[in-house]
Amino acid sequence: MAMKVILTGATGLVGEGVLLECLDNPLVERVLSVSRRTCGRSHPKLSECLVPDFRDLAEVEATLTGYDACFYCAGISSVGLSEAQYTIITYDTPLRFAETLLRCNPGMVFAHVSGAHTDGSEQGKAMWARVKGKAENALMRLPFKAVYNFRPGLMKPTAGQQRVSGVFKLVGALYPLLGLLSPGLTMSEVGRAMINSVRFGAASNVLEAKEMKLLAAR
């Protein structure tokens, strides 16, 4: 099964890691990176679609048609943002993006990177967790072939990643120790888990780190 994938977030840590796995994985035939700016990479499998706003894709819908999956890896920290600001980025934007892709590719699998400790009840005290939970729930109501919400926590950057902050460089160095304290994933495992969710499906619409690791190993 060769799959054609739309990927967002290639200019960030998670998206870059997933992109590298897609480019290296023989199951992926083509990758379209949708982003506000170029990822700066060149590869025979890779093409780019640059857009100023993920919520307004009318002019590029033809470019977004003919794909089997979307790996939505775009995101931002909630630090310094109000709930209203964070909601636009974390809820409104992926939902509008997904609705457009659904029109273009009704048989698509939508794989959404959320985060550990996301609040699926939407009722908790942590603002970021509520908003992420609201996004997960809204996406799961869309009639894609399947929607999977991935909740990684500790992640180790993969070789060749360029967009690794000082914090994640430290995580990479301490990964063997930190992995003893909480379930950890390499970026390659995150990418393989997303690819395998398209290939095999998954037992749940919400996948924590342990389930992601098992799915990556299939």
Image (cartoon, grey):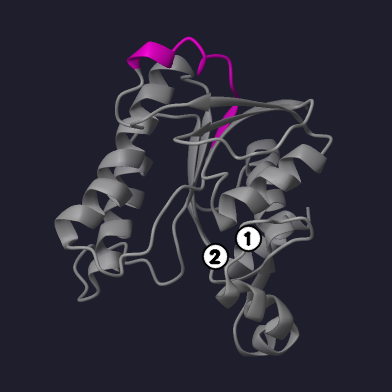
Q: Main secondary structure of the magenta part?
A: loop
Q: Quadrant of residue 69?
A: top right
Is 82 situated above or below 169?
above
Q: In the image, which residues are magenta? A: 58-70
Task: Determine whether the residue tagged by mark 1 lies in a helix, strand or loop.
Answer: helix
Task: Determine whether the residue tagged by mark 2 lies in a helix, strand or loop.
Answer: loop
* Circle 1 crowding by C-alpha within 10 Å: few under 14, some 14–19, many from 20: many
Inspect the image, locate mark 1, and give the three-letter code of the amino acid beneath it.
Answer: Met
Q: Is residue 161 covered in magenta? A: no
Tell me: 56 left or right of 165: left
Position in image of residue 58 (x %, y %): 34, 15
For label 1, the residue is 212
* Circle 2 crowding by C-alpha within 10 Å: few under 14, some 14–19, many from 20: many
Inspect the image, locate mark 2, and give the three-letter code of the amino acid beneath it.
Answer: Pro
- Which of 84 and 119 lies nearest the eye of the viewer? 84
Q: Quadrant of the N terminus?
A: top right
Q: Residue placed farthest to the top in the image? A: 62
Q: Is residue 66 covered in magenta? A: yes
Residue sitting at x 20%, y 54%? 85
Disc number at residue 152?
Answer: 2
Q: Quadrant of residue 180?
A: bottom right
- Which of 46 and 144 lies nearest the eye of the viewer? 46
Which sits earlier in the primary sequence, circle 1 or circle 2? 2
Residue sitting at x 31%, y 65%? 78
Tell me, yes or no, whether the two marked residues, 1 and 2, touch with CB atoms within 8 Å.
Answer: yes
Is 50 situated above or below 168?
above
Position in image of residue 82 (x %, y %): 17, 63
Residue sitting at x 75%, y 84%? 176
Tell me: 90 left or right of 73: left
Disc number at residue 90?
Answer: none
Q: CA distance from mark 1 to mark 2?
A: 8 Å
